[in-house]
Image: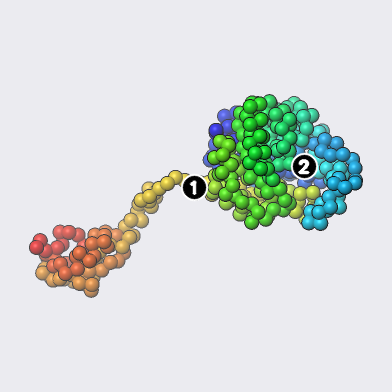
């Protein structure tokens, strides 16, 4: 299966650079301001993102307007401890009326815009905007009817696998492919906010690809860019990272989002990591070949007369590399030179006595 970047190179003119397809996730970092949302689009494009992603939901498509029990976040370690789910989603939502301007601004800035839908109604909205890609969030991986609805659009799909068992991933993949998804990428995701590097378990990514025969990548909730670079080295073809203009200004996801300078570094370093993987190569690259002259080789260490015997004092293993290889050193000790030779002469076979 071609990578998402390769697929989009054929359908949307995305450059097939071989680097991961890097997605800037706006989420709720717009802080209920369309102007700020558009500034985030501009900054994401300037930072080198391939795409800007939003989320398409309303509070009512996510949960019930209740406060009792599980409808309020009670985990004291959560960034959103004490918040009602309904209120949190009302704060984080990107209104339907903003979708068009955000998509239009992204196109004007030369990057793709797409979204994570959380309902069939959201898919309809995104289809009217001709969304080029769809993302399914980790918590919705078990929502097979939603996955089927997205797959039936015939668009490529990115699916986060946070918390999912092998069987749950298998069900989602089967539904997506059978319903017509032409290109599928599964993202390794640790569904904690922020996530620790120790909990990232990146070696799972290649196993995901091998097990399901699809592309794989990373939805990264850790701080910094190190985990994303490591994921690239393990073959991640998509990197998704939350993005904000300024963490100090707050926002529902700002605590684990990258600012523009950090995101630019992520794009640069994941590109370098992808370039560095290369191919299996022994014997040095073309650019390294001049360096062979700098290797150690055998040289005459002192002036010698014909018939003198090579000794550790007169036969030296030094740089540069114009003489015989050092592997001949022991065999040449005790041999005689066949002619006068000056200090600094590279040793060649024709210097030796013919005995």
Label 2, on which residue? 37
As drawn, the residue found furthest toward the front would be: 167
Which label sits in the foreground, 1 or 2?
Answer: 1
Task: Determine the residue positioned at 68% across, 25% down.
Answer: 152
User: Tag on residue 277?
Assistant: 1
40 relative position to 353: left or right: right
First along the sequence among labels 1 and 2: 2
Residue 236, placed above or below residue 100: below
As drawn, the residue found furthest toward the bottom would be: 313
- Dot 1: within a 10 Å radius of its alpha carbon, few (fewer than 14), some, or many (20 or more) residues? few
48 and 270: which is toward the camera: 270
Cα separation between marks 1 and 2: 36 Å
Q: Is residue 227 visible?
A: yes
In the rendered view of the protein, which quadrant contains the N terminus?
Answer: top right
Residue 148, placed above or below residue 233: above
Task: Determine the residue positioned at 66% across, 34% down.
Answer: 171
Q: Quadrant of residue 12?
A: top right
Task: Determine the residue positioned at 71% across, 48% down.
Answer: 191
- Measuring from the top left, give residue 274's x and y in whole percent: 53, 46
40 and 64: which is toward the camera: 64
300 and 210: which is toward the camera: 210
Picture colour scheme:
rainbow
- Measuring from the top left, give residue 307's x and y in whole percent: 10, 69
Identify the element where label 2 is drawn. Answer: helix
Q: Is residue 271 visible?
A: no
Q: Quadrant of residue 335?
A: bottom left
Residue 216, placed above or below residue 81: above
75 relative position to 348: left or right: right
Identify the element where label 1 is drawn. Answer: helix
34 relative position to 347: left or right: right
- Measuring from the top left, give residue 214's x and y in whole percent: 58, 36
């Amino acid at each position: 299966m071609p990578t998402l970047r390769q697929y989009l190179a054929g359908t949307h003119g995305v450059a097939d650079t071989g680097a991961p397809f890097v997605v800037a996730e706006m989420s709720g970092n717009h802080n209920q301001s369309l102007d700020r949302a558009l500034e985030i689009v501009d900054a994401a494009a300037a930072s080198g993102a391939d795409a800007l992603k939003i989320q398409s939901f309303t509070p009512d498509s996510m949960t019930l307007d209740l406060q009792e029990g599980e409808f309020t976040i009670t985990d004291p370690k959560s960034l959103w401890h004490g918040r009602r789910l309904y209120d949190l989603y009302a704060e984080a939502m990107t209104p339907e009326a903003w979708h068009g301007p955000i998509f239009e601004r992204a196109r004007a800035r030369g990057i793709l815009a797409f979204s994570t839908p959380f309902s069939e109604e959201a898919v309809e909205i995104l289809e009217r905007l001709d969304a080029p890609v769809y993302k399914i969030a980790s918590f919705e991986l078990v929502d097979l009817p939603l996955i089927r609805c997205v797959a039936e659009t015939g668009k490529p799909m990115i699916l986060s696998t946070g918390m999912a068992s092998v069987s749950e991933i298998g069900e989602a993949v089967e539904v997506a492919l059978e319903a017509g998804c032409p290109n599928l990428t599964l993202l390794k995701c640790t569904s904690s906010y922020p996530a620790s590097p120790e909990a990232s378990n990146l070696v799972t990514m290649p196993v995901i690809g091998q097990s399901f025969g699809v592309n794989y990548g990373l939805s990264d909730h850790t701080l910094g860019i190190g985990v994303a670079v490591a994921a690239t080295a393990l073959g991640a073809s998509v990197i998704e990272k939350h993005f904000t203009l300024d963490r100090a200004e707050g926002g529902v996801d700002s605590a684990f989002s990258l600012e523009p300078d950090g995101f630019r570094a992520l794009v640069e370093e994941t590109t370098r990591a992808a370039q560095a993987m290369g191919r299996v190569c022994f014997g040095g690259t073309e650019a390294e070949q001049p360096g062979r002259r700098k290797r150690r080789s055998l040289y005459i260490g002192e002036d010698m007369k014909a018939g003198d015997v090579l000794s550790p004092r007169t036969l030296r293993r030094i740089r540069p590399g114009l003489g015989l290889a050092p592997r001949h050193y022991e065999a040449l000790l005790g041999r005689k030179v066949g002619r006068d030779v000056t200090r600094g002469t590279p040793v060649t076979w024709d210097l030796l006595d013919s005995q």
